[in-house]
Image (spheres, rainbow, N blue to C red):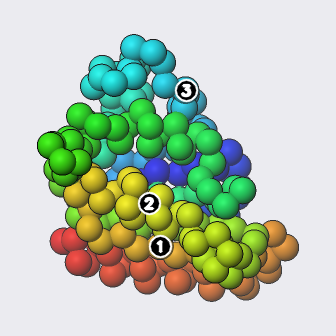
Amino acid sequence: MVLAHPGADSFCAALATQAVGELRAHGFSVALQDLYADGFDPRMPLAEVGTTFMADELVSRYAAEVLAADVIVVVHPVWFFHVPGILKGWVDRVLREGIVYELRGGGESVGRLMARSALLLNTANAPESVEAEVLGDPLDVFWRRVVFAPAGVSDVRRLRFAKVAGSSAAQRAAWLAEARLALSALASEAS
């Protein structure tokens, strides 16, 4: 479970809390990686570039948790039609070559993750049509093809909740219910 939002009272935080509770209710133990609260440094140090060396204990812990996971849930806002910088740093430092996948000749990748399913819970303010139709859905391409496919995760699901800014308590409750159903389905299938 990865959370990439600085606000403990944000809707992203509520989604993450919902995810942790739902997965635990289905018998999963959950490792929560709250990037901001944990003080994760997204900057890749030179010692990590092109290696499997991990320059700090937090990156080592995150990688071990991801490698052992049965399912992966990532919660983040959509900022400038992409992931927050701290989450891109998590991808760069934790989900790198030699850790979660290896490249073989001809560009073939072999995934090392146990997880075969991932659920992305995104909050946004722009209309979905702008992301999908105008920009070609950059987040879908990023998560499915760039991040998870090489690591061996074939089932990538995404729920997008928008417009979050100014949304009512009733709307947020409905979104949480939608997320609960998706999490329950993911957990049931992974059991």
Please name the amino acid that badge 3 sits on.
Answer: Arg
Disc 1 from disc 3: Cα separation: 26 Å
Please give the name of the residue rendered at 30% of the width and 23% of the height, measured from the top-left corner.
51
Tell me if residue 171 comes above or below residue 56 in the rendering: below
Quarter placement of the C terminus? bottom left
According to the picture, the residue beneath numbered tag 2 turns out to be 143
Please name whichever residue, 95 or 26, is drawn nearer the observer in this view of the structure.
Answer: 95
According to the picture, the residue beneath numbered tag 3 turns out to be 43
According to the picture, the residue beneath numbered tag 1 turns out to be 158
Q: Position of residue 19 (x, y in %)?
A: 46, 65
Of labels 1 and 2, earlier in sequence is 2
Of labels 3 and 2, earlier in sequence is 3
Q: Horizontally, is 51 left or right of 119 in the view? A: left
For residue 108, say whether it is visible.
yes
Please name the amino acid that badge 2 sits on.
Answer: Trp
Please give the name of the residue rendered at 52% of the width and 37% of the height, measured from the top-left corner.
89
Furthest residue toward front: 106
Element class at badge 1: strand
Tell me if residue 116 comes above or below residue 175 in the rendering: above
Q: Where is residue 20 in the image (x, y as percent from the top left)?
A: 43, 60
Disc 1 from disc 2: Cα separation: 9 Å
Q: Where is residue 105 in the image (x, y as percent from the top left)?
A: 15, 43
Quarter placement of the N terminus? bottom left
Q: Nearer the viewer, mark 1 or mark 2?
A: 2
Element class at badge 3: loop
